[in-house]
Image (cartoon, rainbow, N blue to C red):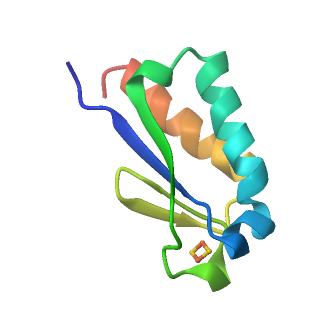
């Protein structure tokens, strides 16, 4: 069994007001719509110390900042598209 993909979203107040409030919903809906919840450990995290370039999230330890919802969708499609094709 493959290890779960770890998605941490910063729940600090700066990131939350900069867009993570929406990105939480976007990720949650994406995982539900694509039946991916069993592959992912999706959880909130404390401030990553990058508040000035938030909203901030990490996927398998890789830091993403200043993501819009559209950019996040590209990241998620890339991540799960690659997995499902076995690359
Ligand atoms: S509040 Fe998100 S990095 Fe600080």
Quarter of the view holding residue 2: top left
| x 78%, y 49%: residue | 22
Residue 69: x %, y % from top left? 75, 49
Q: Quadrant of the C terminus?
A: top left
14, above or below 42, in the image: below
Identify the residue at the far bottom of this view: 52
Residue at figure coordinates x 39%, y 60% from the top left: 62
Q: Residue at x 51, y 67 (%)?
A: 46
**Residue 7 in the image, given as x and y percentages of width and height:** 46, 46
Q: In which quarter of the image is ligand 1?
A: bottom right
Query: Up-down: is 16 above or below 36?
Result: below
Q: Which residue is drawn at 51% across and 37% down?
A: 78
Residue 6 visible to an observer of this rendering: yes
- x, y percent for residue 68: 75, 57
Quarter occupied by the N terminus: top left
Q: Residue furthest left?
A: 1
Front one among 79 and 85: 79
Q: Is residue 68 visible?
A: no
Q: Which of 47 and 31 is in front in this view?
A: 47
């Amino acid at each position: 069994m493959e290890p779960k993909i770890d998605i941490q979203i910063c729940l600090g107040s700066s990131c939350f007001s900069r867009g993570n409030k929406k990105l939480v919903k976007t990720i949650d809906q994406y995982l539900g719509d694509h039946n991916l919840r069993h592959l992912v450990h999706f959880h909130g995290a404390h401030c990553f110390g990058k508040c000035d370039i938030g909203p901030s999230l990490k996927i398998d330890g890789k830091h993403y900042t200043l993501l819009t919802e559209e950019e996040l969708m590209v990241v998620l499609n890339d991540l799960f598209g690659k997995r499902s094709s076995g690359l």
